[in-house]
Structure formats: structure tokens, C-alpha cells
Image (cartoon, rainbow, N blue to C red):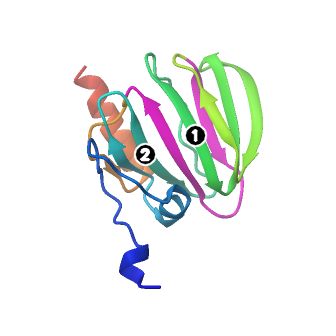
Amino acid sequence: MNFWKSFTPIKDYGPNPFVVNIEKITRQNNTFRSALWTGKHLQLTLMSIKPGEDIGFEMHPDTDQFIRIEEGQGMVKMGDTRDNISFQEKVSDGYVILVPAGKWHNLINTGNKPIKLYSIYAPPHHPHGTVHKTKEESEIAEAQHNTNL
């Protein structure tokens, strides 16, 4: 098989029509977060969470989120407030996490290899073309975004 035919560059293809092997490109991703497709009402991002790392407690007031784990294992936590976590579940390859708008949530990597996942936001949560190579880069961008609101 030709490498270039099997390799899809990771960039934001939205809002154009797009077809991809989601499992393959999710496993290929090595950035903390990269937007793969951003449309008017939906966004697809890829994430790679290092062992011992987490997404960080966050809440999207007007955005529902679908998360699918393709590789790795972790612990998902959710609740009505950051300090009132009422839901906790172990997750691994093949698991789906559904996060309702307004719920605080976090995913912690409890394994010894990166968690590879894709996430669908409705409506989009990150700017078109978002790439955060590291969690630290993501936190800086989120802080800047929140001060500009």
C-alpha cells in the first residue's frame, strides 16, 4: 500500500465535504487537540492525552459533546459543579462518553500509553483550524479565549 494514499494530513477540512477513516486518523494524531472538521453546527476534534495527563475539568454551557476512545484507558468524571462530581466511570478502547451541555467533566489517562480519542461538539467549541500541540498550549488558548468573551 502506498504510504501517501494511506496518510491523511491532520488539518481542519471544514466546512467542506470530507470522508476519513476516523479510527486510523485518531490513532495517527499526536497533538493534545487538533480540529479535523469545523462546520456551522458541528465540530470534530482529535486528542492525544499522555499517561497521567487529563483533559482538565471543563464545562461547555451551550455545547453537547460526544467522545469516542480509540486507544488507551482512563477515568471519566462528571457533575453539576466542579466540586460536586456525581458520575465516575472507567473507560477504554471503544467506549463512548456523552457529555450534556452544562456538565462539568474531565477525562484522566490512567494507563501507560496515550489515550487517542475523537470528540464531536455541537455547536463547535474551538476556533476553525485549532491545533494545540500540548495541554499547556491548550490551557493558554482557553484562558485567552475566556478573557476575550
Classify the position of the C terminus by image quarter: top left
Q: Give me the disc on residue 123.
A: none
In magenta segment, residue 65:
no
Q: Which residues are magenta?
A: 103-123
Q: Position of residue 50 (x, y in %)?
A: 57, 58
Residue 52 visible to the viewer: no
Q: Residue at x 58, y 45 (%)?
A: 54
Residue 60 placement, left or right of 130: right
Does any portion of residue 59 appear in the rendered image? yes
User: How far is mark 1 from mark 2, CA to CA?
Assistant: 9 Å
Q: Nearer the viewer, residue 99 or 8?
A: 8
| Horizontal relation, residue 131 to residue 107: left or right | left
Q: Which residue is mark 1?
A: 67
Q: Is residue 8 left or right of residue 67?
A: left
Q: Position of residue 32 (x, y in %)?
A: 45, 53
Q: Is residue 113 above or below residue 66?
A: below
Which residue does the numbered mark 2 point to in the structure image? 45
- Helix, strand, or loop for circle 2? strand
User: Which three-letter amino acid code belongs to the residue tagged 1?
Assistant: Ile
| Disc 2 crowd, CA 10 A, few/some/many (<14, 14-19, 20+) | many
- Give the residue displayed 26% in from the left and 45% down from the top: 16
Query: Which residue in the rendered view is the most extreme toward the left?
Result: 148
Q: Residues within 10 Å of mark 1 (few under 14, many from 20)?
A: some
Q: Is residue 106 magenta?
A: yes
Q: Position of residue 98 (x, y in %)?
A: 62, 30
Q: Is residue 41 above or below residue 2?
A: above
| Amino acid type, residue under disc 2 in the picture | Thr
Residue 3 in the image, given as x and y percentages of width and height: 41, 82
Q: Nearer the viewer, residue 23 or 62?
A: 23
Q: Write the residue at 27% across / 33% down.
A: 144
Residue sitting at the far bottom:
1
**Helix, strand or loop for the magenta stretch, by majority:** strand
